[in-house]
Image: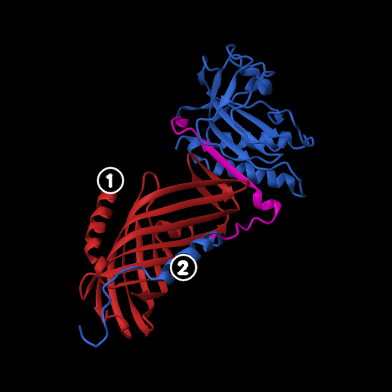
Chain colours: A blue, B red
C-alpha cells in the first residue's frame, strides 16, 4: 500500500451510517407525493371491465330495457333523488353505441319471438356505495321478458375485479348473456360492465353533451365488444 | 425466487471473509430518470430518492457490498389506462415506488487506505431483489400491485476522500428489474450523491 496511513482491519459500519439509516427510515413516509385531486371533476371516471372468457364476436343481437333503474344502497339508505330528465338520452346514447359496434337491436315487442344474445341494463346509484353482486331480481324483476327460470333471490355476479367506491349518481351499464347463468347458485354472470362515476351529480350546463361524451368513452375504450 | 435466494447466499458467503478488511458505509441522495416500462407509466424525473450503502474491501481493487435504495416516481394526468380485465379513463395519479436490495461486487481503483484523501474510482454490478409497488389512484378508487422482482444494477462512480475518514460520493447506476408474474419489468437510471465514512 502506498502512503503512510494505516489500514484499519475492522469493518463495523460507522455509527454515523447507522444513525443515518434510522433518520432515512423515518423520512420514508415523506417520499409519497400528493395525488393532486382537488376538484369534483377530478373524480370523474369511466371504468369498463369485461369477462376475458366471453366471446363477444358470437353476439349479434341485443335488448335494452328503456328504463334507468335507480339503486339504493344495500342497507336501503338513499341520497337525494336523481333527475329522470336524462334517462331517455342515456338509453338512446347507449343504443347508438352498441348498434355502431354491429349489434342488432331487438325491440321489446319482439322479445317473445326472438331471444337476443345479450341484454344491456342501465342503472344509477342513489347513494354512495361500494358495488358488488346485487339483488338482481329486486331491481329488474319487473321486466316481463326474462327467460322464465329466473326469480327472487337471483343475483348478478361480476367475474372480474370491481373495486371502486361509487359516488351517488354513478351510471352503470351491465351486459349479460342469458345463457351464462348458474341456476344452482342463482347467479347471472355479467360479461361487460361500464361505470361512469358521478355522471348524474351536480349536472352543470352542458349536461347533455357531458352524458353523451362519457357514455361514448365507455364504448371507445371497449372495442372488443365488436368482436375484434 | 429460489435462484434469487441462492444468488444472495453465494454473495453473502463471499462477503464473510472480507469482514476483516476496511469498510466504507454511508447514505446517498438519489435522482432517478425512468426508462422503458417505468417511463411509460410515470414519465417524471424522481427527486425523491435515498439510499444506504456499505462495502468492504477484499483486496486493493475489489470490494463486496450491500446497497438499499428507495425511489418514488409519480405523474398526474388523464387518458385511458389498462387495468386488470378492463380500462379506466379519468384524472389519475400514477406512482411507482422501487426499493432494490442488492449485493454488489465492486472493482476499485485509487487509494483505499484509511484516512486517504483523493479519488477512489469504482465500477460494480449489483444483483438482488427489487420491491416494486405500482399504484394508480383514479376517482375514488385505486389499483395497486406490489411485487418482488429479481434484478441487477451496473454502476460506476467515484468517492473523494476529504479527510476525517469521510468521502463524498458521486455515481450513476442503471437499475433493471426483471418481469415478475404478470407485472412488467422496470428500469431507471439513478444519479447518486452521497457521504460515507471509512472504518
Residue found at x 36% / y 58%: B101
x, y percentage for residue A160?
Answer: 50, 34
Up-down: is B188 above or below B85? below
Residue A98 badge:
none
Magenta span: A32-57
x, y percentage for residue B75?
Answer: 54, 60
Element carrying mark 1: helix
Using a 10 Å C-alpha cutoff, classify the residue at mark 1 as few (fewer than 14 neighbours), some (14 to 19) or many (20 or more). Answer: few
Residue A19 badge:
2
Up-down: is A76 above or below A20? above
x, y percentage for residue B198?
Answer: 34, 75
Residue found at x 65% / y 40%: A166
Residue found at x 49% / y 36%: A226
Marks 2 and 1 sit apart, C-alpha to C-alpha, by 33 Å
- Quarter occupied by the N terminus of chain A: bottom left
x, y percentage for residue B163?
Answer: 37, 85
Instruction: Examine the image and state in which quarter residue B17 appears.
Output: bottom left
**Whether residue B46 can be seen here:** no
- Does residue B163 show up magenta in the picture? no
- Quarter occupied by the C terminus of chain A: top left
Amino acid at each position: 500500500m502506498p502512503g503512510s496511513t494505516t489500514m484499519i482491519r475492522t469493518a463495523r459500519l460507522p455509527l454515523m451510517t447507522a444513525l443515518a439509516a434510522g433518520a432515512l427510515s423515518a423520512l420514508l413516509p415523506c417520499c409519497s407525493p400528493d395525488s393532486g385531486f382537488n376538484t369534483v371533476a377530478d373524480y370523474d371516471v369511466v371504468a369498463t371491465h369485461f369477462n376475458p372468457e366471453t366471446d363477444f364476436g358470437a353476439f349479434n343481437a341485443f335488448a335494452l330495457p328503456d328504463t334507468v333503474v335507480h339503486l339504493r344502497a344495500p342497507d336501503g339508505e338513499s341520497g337525494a333523488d336523481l333527475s329522470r330528465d336524462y334517462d331517455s338520452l342515456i338509453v338512446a346514447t347507449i343504443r347508438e353505441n352498441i348498434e355502431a359496434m354491429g349489434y342488432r337491436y331487438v325491440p321489446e315487442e319482439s322479445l317473445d319471438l326472438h331471444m337476443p344474445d345479450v341484454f344491456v341494463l342501465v342503472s344509477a346509484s342513489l347513494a354512495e356505495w361500494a358495488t358488488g353482486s346485487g339483488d338482481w331480481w329486486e331491481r329488474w324483476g319487473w321486466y316481463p321478458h326474462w327467460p322464465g327460470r329466473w326469480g327472487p333471490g337471483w343475483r348478478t355476479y361480476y367475474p372480474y375485479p370491481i373495486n371502486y367506491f361509487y359516488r351517488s349518481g354513478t351510471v352503470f351499464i351491465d351486459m349479460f348473456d342469458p345463457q351464462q347463468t348458474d341456476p344452482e347458485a342463482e347467479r347471472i354472470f355479467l360479461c361487460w360492465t361500464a361505470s361512469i362515476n358521478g355522471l348524474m351529480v351536480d349536472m352543470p350546463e352542458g349536461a347533455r353533451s357531458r352524458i353523451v361524451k362519457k357514455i361514448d368513452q365507455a364504448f371507445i375504450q371497449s372495442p372488443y365488444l365488436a368482436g375484434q | 425466487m429460489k435462484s434469487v435466494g441462492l444468488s444472495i447466499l453465494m454473495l453473502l458467503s463471499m462477503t464473510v471473509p472480507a469482514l476483516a478488511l476496511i469498510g466504507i458505509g454511508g447514505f446517498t441522495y438519489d435522482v432517478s430518470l425512468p426508462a422503458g416500462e417505468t417511463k411509460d407509466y410515470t414519465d417524471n424525473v424522481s427527486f425523491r430518492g435515498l439510499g444506504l450503502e456499505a462495502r468492504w474491501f477484499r483486496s486493493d481493487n475489489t470490494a463486496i457490498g450491500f446497497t438499499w435504495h428507495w425511489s418514488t416516481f409519480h405523474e398526474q394526468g388523464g387518458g385511458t389506462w389498462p387495468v386488470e380485465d378492463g380500462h379506466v379513463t379519468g384524472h389519475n395519479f400514477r406512482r411507482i415506488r422501487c426499493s432494490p436490495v442488492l449485493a454488489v461486487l465492486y472493482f476499485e481503483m485509487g487509494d483505499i487506505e484509511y484516512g486517504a484523501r483523493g479519488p477512489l474510482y469504482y465500477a460494480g454490478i449489483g444483483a438482488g431483489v427489487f420491491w416494486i409497488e405500482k399504484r394508480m389512484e383514479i376517482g375514488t378508487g385505486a389499483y395497486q400491485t406490489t411485487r418482488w422482482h429479481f434484478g441487477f444494477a451496473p454502476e460506476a462512480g467515484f468517492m473523494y476522500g476529504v479527510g476525517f475518514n469521510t468521502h463524498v460520493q458521486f455515481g450513476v447506476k442503471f437499475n433493471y428489474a426483471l418481469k415478475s408474474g404478470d407485472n412488467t419489468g422496470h428500469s431507471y437510471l439513478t444519479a447518486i450523491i452521497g457521504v460515507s465514512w471509512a472504518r
